[in-house]
Image: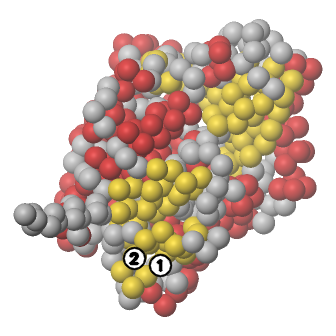
Amino acid sequence: MTGAPVAERPQPARAVVIGAGFGGLAAAVRLGARGYRVTVVDRLGQAGGRARVFRQDGFTFDAGPTVITAPFLLEELWSLAGRRMADDIDLRSVSPFYRVRFDDGTTFDYTGSPDAMRAEVARLAPDDVAGYEAFVRQSEEIFRVGFEQLAHVPFSSIWDMARIAPSMLRLESYRTVYGLVSKHVRHPKLRQVLSFHPLLVGGNPFSTTSVYTLIAFLERKWGVHFPMGGTGTLVQGLVRLIERLGGELRLGAEVSEITLAGRRATGVRLSSGEVLPADVVVSNADAAWTYRHLVPAHARRRWTDRRIEGARYSMSLFVWYFGTRRTYDDVQHHTILLGPRYRELLDDIFKRKVLADDFSLYLHRPTATDPALAPDGCDAFYVLSPVPNLAGGTDWARDAEPYRQRIGQYLDATVLPGLEQQIVTSRLLTPQQFHDDLLSFRGAAFSFEPVLTQSAYFRPHNESEDIERLYLVGAGTHPGGGVPGVLSSARVLDTLVPDPDALR
């Protein structure tokens, strides 16, 4: 007796994620946990995007993000895959968060302790203690709205913007970060200490909306952390979660276009000619690059070539990675070295787009927390200088080495004495490489500049306005740059991407 034929089990809905940066990896975990069969495609030979890792001469260098805040966003990803992050990642608190060094040699230790911060403010600017505490209170208010209520929700309609307008007006989002800080404190050094945070996400404190002052309270609430083994351990941990959920990574495979059926994304075509069909496509590639180069012009109504070319883009970065044959034990994990000019230097970078003779720097010494990132008795460093994006026309093939030498001489004369004689390994990352290797439009390190008119609804949407079933994550979409912002952009997709069963 022959039984009835067994119905074939429907294939799971497919998702292709373009780019294996933090945003793409986080999106892949979330989609995999919902039942999608996920393929992550990246043109580089390793996962991580801006968070990739360089290894040379026994040193390990995190290429990009080194300040980990809001760890719950990462813990949530591990939980979705049925694991505890603490079982895979040894995340250590860093204190001080930053040592800020002014050009005259004075310092300010920026921490999460209210008492310690009050004491530092009193030491630097005793007349500003009350104003500083008022600033912290306003930072918390902005955090409660800007991060807790808005960072994880989409802005797909102008009505979404209208709904929050009263709150944003009440919280003075029309002010710049520097303007809001200056409302509360008068000392010029304290104004710099409290306003540099936008530079960590690609913004100019003198033009970035004051919503970004929420970073000050976000850091106080959850702290600043560093994973033992470097940020690359987080990347590899996320890769393992994707594989645990049945997904796969295709590295060394470049997407040449997003395939369409009318105005609906149907997959991607690789530069090899291979087509990967998909029910949904998520792009963690640079948002401007995605529209300018991966979506044909005839299918774009909002993100036209003219609009993309006319947008404002973040500054770029010059990063020098180096190892020394000795340790510098008095240098903190994170050091901000402020140069002789503040506003004028930022004008050079963001407005005039010229490579100035002076600079302000972020110095990263991960071996202060994890000595295993360098050979015994050695230190690993990277020093980062905000510089103009490629719209400024700097010839980095010509100017990179002289610029590195100037930075080296400055570090030698300030916090790393004898540096030039101690270097045993070295490499550079320039704005041209942001463009050529990471496909960042105009070499901008953080995509669209986070000014008010390019925030929330006015950024490229998480759900594409032009193409159905195309979704964006990363620094160029809502809510913006920085590790928490990028991870939050993937979280937004939970409310936008349909359930896989609805697509089969």
Which residue is disc 2 drawn over? 265
Q: Pointers 1 and 2 in contact (CB under 8 A)?
A: yes
Where is residue 406? Give x, y as percent: 86, 38
- Residue 394 in sight here: yes
Name the mark on residue 306.
Answer: none
Which residue is disc 1 drawn over? 259
Q: Quadrant of the C terminus?
A: bottom left
Left or right: residue 202 compared with residue 252: left
The amino acid marked with disc number 1 is Thr
| Helix, strand or loop at mark 1 | strand
Q: Quadrant of residue 440?
A: bottom right
- Residue 343 in sight here: no
| Helix, strand or loop at mark 2 | strand
Q: Quadrant of residue 12?
A: bottom left
Badge count? 2
Where is residue 439? Give x, y as percent: 63, 62
The residue shown at (61%, 75%) is 273
Disc 2 residue crowd, few under 14, some 14–19, many 20+, Cα 10 Å? many
The residue shown at (64%, 37%) is 53
**Which tag, 1 or 2, sits closer to the chain's start?**
1
Disc 1 residue crowd, few under 14, some 14–19, many 20+, Cα 10 Å? many
Q: How much space separates mark 1 and mark 2, taking CA atoms?
A: 6 Å
The residue shown at (83%, 56%) is 396
Where is residue 249? Give x, y as percent: 51, 50
Where is residue 114? Give x, y as percent: 35, 18
